[in-house]
Image (spheres, rainbow, N blue to C red):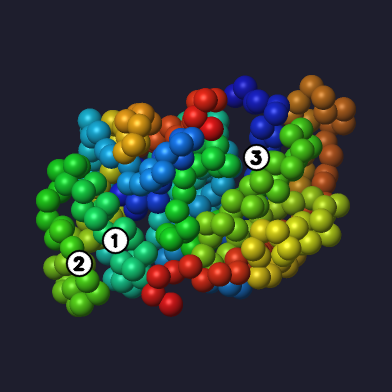
Amino acid sequence: MAKQIELEQYPTGPHIASRLLYTAENSFGDVTDKVVADFGCGCGTLGLAAALLGAEHVIGFDIDAESIEIAYSNADELELDMDFVQCDIRNLGLSDRNIDTVVMNPPFGTRKKGADMEFLSVALKVASQAVYSLHKTTTRDHIKRTALRDYNARSAEVVCELRFDVPQLYKFHKKKEVDVAVDLWRFVPKTDRSKDS
Amino acid sequence: MRLLTHNMLSSNIKGVTNGFPLLIEAVKVVEKEVDFNEDFLKNMFVKVEWKALVEASRTLGYTELPESAEASMLDSDEFLRKFHHALLELHLEDGALVCPETGRKFPVSKGIPNMLLHEDEV
């Protein structure tokens, strides 16, 4: 699969995916029976894990057709229902009424500066209940400050710290493997936008 | 693509004032049964744009949803089943989503809409 370097496509390992989704459901009840969106879904790992945990409706969003192809066939193989939308999440017309939880492993912003923040900004606009996201531990203070001050987050907590193994995927990767300290965040958006409350 | 997803999407083309709901061109529609979840439906009812759902389901060939609906109808199992079917069991496989203002088509293939905007639409 030809990877597009600028998109920073790194697969979410199964251990990280299960950690993220199990925490979201077992500690916070944010997955089962909910509408879950997977931003930058790639091969669909997080969204499919959500479906396995009983999310009622899951939608994966990604800009890359090839990734969506793979995610689609993964869903098919696992016999899981998941919708996919090919789009640029930053300019997609997406309502804030129906999505309960956003899960994502966004680009870290090493190629295109600020990519991770753009994803977080959109996520906090559309999620009603919670946003789960992975960001480099080195950006922790910046993320917390920005989420609370600029992105409408009522709370921004690091749920746990994980190590993300980045294999030597690209020519510009000098080392065989590097492991990156990554925070699993849980953000709660400020306003309750559901019509009936 | 389920109609629940369609209910969330709008055209964000530059200059468009109201890009919701997207019109549907249905070339291939598929029905896939899924478990009935009453609590989920009751929850979703207040969040869904009803008119858009009715229109969309009719375009996909399902005419059972009432033109307008109110919360009291959630007591009816028959109504809930129709709502369930329209929202979660009808899939647009092939066709297009169409911007209501510009007529621009966003193709849908294998149930996946391509909502990428061209450079001059951003």
The CA span between labels 1 and 3 is 31 Å
**Measured from the top left, where is residue A67 in percent x and y?**
54, 32
Q: Amino acid at mark 2?
A: Ala
Q: Is residue A108 left or right of residue A89?
A: right
Residue A54 is labelled as none
In the structure shown, which secondary structural element does the residue marked by tag 3 occupy?
A: loop
User: Compared with residue A196, is residue A181 higher up or lower down, i.e. above or below?
Assistant: above
Determine which of the numbered discs, if any, sits on residue B35 in the image. 1
From this view, report whether residue A150 is shown above or below residue A129. above
> Within 10 Å of the Cα at label 1, are there few (<14), some (14-19), or many (20+) other Cα atoms?
few
Residue B47 sits in quarter: bottom left
Amino acid, disc 3: Pro
The residue positioned 33% from the left and 60% from the top of the image is: B48
Residue A86 in the figure: left or right of residue B73 = right
Q: Chain of mark 2?
A: B
Residue under label 3, please give it. Answer: A11
Q: Residues within 10 Å of mark 3 (few under 14, many from 20)?
A: some
Measured as percent of width and height from the top left, residue A51 is found at 46, 55
In primary-sequence order, the first of circles 2 and 1 is: 1
Quadrant housing the N terminus of chain B: top left
Rendered view: A129 above or below A66: below
- From the viewer's side, name the closer residue of A77 and A49: A49
The CA distance from mark 2 to mark 1 is: 22 Å
